[in-house]
Amino acid sequence: MSLEKLIKRCKQNDIKAQEELYRLYAGKMFGLCLKYSDSYAQAEDNLQDGFLTIFDKIGQYKHQGSFEGWMKRIMINTTLQKYRKEKLYSISNEDQIEETTVEYEESSLPLDFLLSIVQQLPQRYREVFNMYVLDGYSHKEIAGILQISEGTSKSNLSRARSLLKESIESNQHNSSAKTL
């Protein structure tokens, strides 16, 4: 069945079509939820909530742009809504933000290590890092979605990069000490 036909059937609350759409996209959407969640179990809950929102709002999809992109936005927003109320973001002065760059030898860092250190970032830093670096949101968009200032978004990104740099440098130091 074509995606367009599947979407049409989902708009008509066809349970079989919803199950098929879920099977088609659950893997990708779960990976997205995992980036923004503190744990595997929380990501599973966020995935379910996100799909409920998608099925509830599928009538609003106007077939303009990528359907998968539309779903990703809903999934991210649904996941982040849970955290907006917690006021996790500290207000920062934009003049005090310094850009952090991370230098590393590409072959020396396994992907599972990189994913684990990103997952270990404090939630407020992880969310901004994921949105800016991995999902391509601008600081203005992040500020709007998370209901924070652009300066806070920039500050949280800078702090996330600093923490990641520390973890990478620590790993590289430990790796070189083991080879001695």
Image (tube, helix red, strand yellow):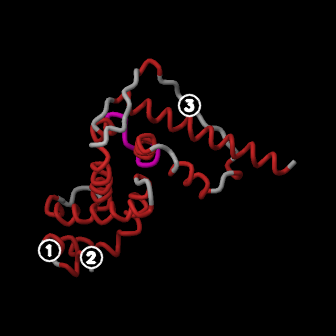
Quadrant in the rendering for residue 164? top right
Q: Residue at x 50, y 38 (%)?
A: 160
The Cα atoms of the two marked residues, 3 and 2, are separated by 45 Å
Of badges 3 and 2, the one in the foreground is 3
Image spot of residue 156 (x, y percent)? 44, 34
Q: Quadrant of the N terminus?
A: bottom left
**Residues tagged 2 and 1 counted as in contact (Cβ below 8 A):** no
Quadrant in the rendering for residue 116? bottom right
The Cα atoms of the two marked residues, 2 and 1, are separated by 17 Å
Q: What element carries label 2?
A: loop
Q: Which amino acid, by three-letter code, is at mark 1?
A: Asn
* 105 or 149, nearer to the observer: 149
112 relative to 160 in the view: left or right = right
- In the image, which disc is placed on residue 100? 3
Q: In this view, does 99 lie above or below 80?
A: above
Work out whether mark 3 precedes mark 2 in sequence or the reverse, and give the earlier one: 2
Quadrant in the rendering for residue 149? top left
For the record, the magenta segment spans 133-140
Residue carrying label 1:
13
Q: Is mark 1 on a helix, strand or loop?
A: loop
* 142 or 62, nearer to the observer: 142
Q: Which amino acid, by three-letter code, is at mark 3?
A: Thr
Q: How crowded is mark 1: few (under 14 residues within 10 Å), some or many (20 or more)?
A: some
Q: Which residue is drawn at 31% across and 35% down?
A: 143
Q: What element carries label 3?
A: loop
Work out whether mark 3 precedes mark 1 in sequence or the reverse, and give the earlier one: 1
